[in-house]
Amino acid sequence: MSYNLADQVHDNLRNLLQTNWGERLGFYDFGANLRPLTTEFVSQDDFDSQAIERIAAAVGRWMPYVSLDEFLSDIDRTENKNTAVIRITITYSISALNVLKKSLQVTLYAI
């Protein structure tokens, strides 16, 4: 439970990025829908462009008061060549709350 509005927005943004379409009852298209990208993973450049597009669309629709500043992805294939751990770091700002350049990291697992 959070009593600070900036912390609540941070948690809501994390939930938005980790939710895929069809997982939220009554809101089929809620979420960034990033998990399907992990199964179609071909190259980091292609993944980055698709992920940025999906994240920007979800944030624009569900959290328009959040301004996305930077996107960074890191792909780790050290354990197995057929799987990967993808870490996405988003830097965002919320001008209404005077929150500038706050970071959020989400981890996805690609098969």
Image (spheres, rainbow, N blue to C red):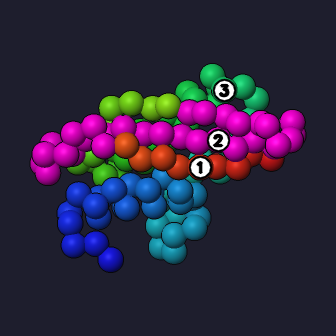
Which residue occupies 57% across, 58% down? 20
Which residue occupies 55% across, 27% down? 49
Q: Is residue 56 visible?
A: yes
Residue 66 belongs to magenta span: no
Rate crowding at label 3 as few (under 14), some (14 to 19) or many (20 or more) other CA atoms within 10 Å: few
Contact (Cβ within 8 Å) of mark 2 with mark 1: yes
Could you tell me how far apart the alpha carbons at marks 2 and 1 are, in whole angstroms?
A: 6 Å
Quadrant of the rendering where the N terminus is positioned: bottom left
**Percent x, y of residue 10:** 33, 56
Rate crowding at label 2 as few (under 14), some (14 to 19) or many (20 or more) other CA atoms within 10 Å: some
Q: Is residue 72 above or below residue 6?
A: above
Residue 107 marker: 1
Residue 52 marker: none
**Percent x, y of residue 39:** 76, 44
User: Of the residues under marks 3 and 1, which one precedes in the sequence?
Assistant: 3
The region drawn magenta spans 73-102
Q: Residue furthest front?
A: 78
Q: Is residue 43 above or below residue 105?
A: above
Q: Is residue 50 visible?
A: no
**Percent x, y of residue 57:** 42, 42
Q: Amino acid at mark 3?
A: Gln
Residue 86 marker: 2
Residue 101 belongs to magenta span: yes
- Which of 34/79 is in front? 79
Image-based side of 108 in relation to 90, left or right: right
